[in-house]
């Protein structure tokens, strides 16, 4: 019985170590990309208003609708909700998506929000709208627009099975075929 207790304790320690390493890796990745890591905040979700109309930026040819817009003084704060996500720090891709909503709120209202909120299953992260985040969003949008204009793109993978199940295979010239 004592042996079982020791094994369970070791497994618990190993899981905690893996969780810590994953958390540290995620934060390092965000730091490499220059994205803010955000901080956990307590919020009153009862005051959140659903965003009912899409926001639009003609300059960046971008339209989108965050899940909620929270009025904070004379500012509007975008909120993105990922109810199934459990993580100790926000994913870089989620920070970038929220950054796009921050850019849209800025373009649509003419007011630059100080931060946005990212709501996971348990935590809410306040992500500051830093110049680095804005720059990363604009850079990503430019890259996406360049990719959209490119006529022949190489496949981004080497998996023939993925192409077989892909809905674009009828008109895709870059399909990967099985040898
Ligand atoms: S068929 Fe074309 S678009 Fe679809 S997965 Fe394959 S390479 Fe990508």
Image (cartoon, rainbow, N blue to C red):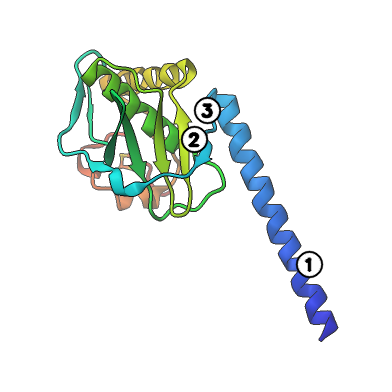
Mark nearest the camera among 2 and 3 is 3
Question: Is 171 situated left or right of 154 in this image?
Answer: left
Q: Are marks 2 and 1 in contact (CB under 8 Å)?
A: no
| Circle 3: element type | loop
Labelled disc at residue 92: 2
Image location of residue 107, percent across then percent down: 25, 17
Q: Tell which residue pokes out farthest to the left in this image.
A: 53
> For mark 3, what is the residue?
36
Residue at the spot 46% in from the left edge and 31% down from the top edge: 127
Quick one: 94 or 169, which is closer to the camera? 94
Location of residue 32 by image quarter: top right
> For mark 1, what is the residue?
10
Image location of residue 76, percent across then percent down: 29, 28
Question: Is 79 situated left or right of 93 in this image?
Answer: left
**Label 2 environment density (alpha carbons within 10 Å; few <14, some 14–19, many ≥20):** some
Q: Are marks 2 and 3 in contact (CB under 8 Å)?
A: no
Ligand 1 placement by image quarter: top left
Gap between marks 3 and 1 measured at Cα: 34 Å
Residue at the spot 59% in from the left edge and 27% down from the top edge: 31
Residue at the spot 40% in from the left edge and 23% down from the top edge: 114
Residue 150 visible to the viewer: no
């Amino acid at each position: 019985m004592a042996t079982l207790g020791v094994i369970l304790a070791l497994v618990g320690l190993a899981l905690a170590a893996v969780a810590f390493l994953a958390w540290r890796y995620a934060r390092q990745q965000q730091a490499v990309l220059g994205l803010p890591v955000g901080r956990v905040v307590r919020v009153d979700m009862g005051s959140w208003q659903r965003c009912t109309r899409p926001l639009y930026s003609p300059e960046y040819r971008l339209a989108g609708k965050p899940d909620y817009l929270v009025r904070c003084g004379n500012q509007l704060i975008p909120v993105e909700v990922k109810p199934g996500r459990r993580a100790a720090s926000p994913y870089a891709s989620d920070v970038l998506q929220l950054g796009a909503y921050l850019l849209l709120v800025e373009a649509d209202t003419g007011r630059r929000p100080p931060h946005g909120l990212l709501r996971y299953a348990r935590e809410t992260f306040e992500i500051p709208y830093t110049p680095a985040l804005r720059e990363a969003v604009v850079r990503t949008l430019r890259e996406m627009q360049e990719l959209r204009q490119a006529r022949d793109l190489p496949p981004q993978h080497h998996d023939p099975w993925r192409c077989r199940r892909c809905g674009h295979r009828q008109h895709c010239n870059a399909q990967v075929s099985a040898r």
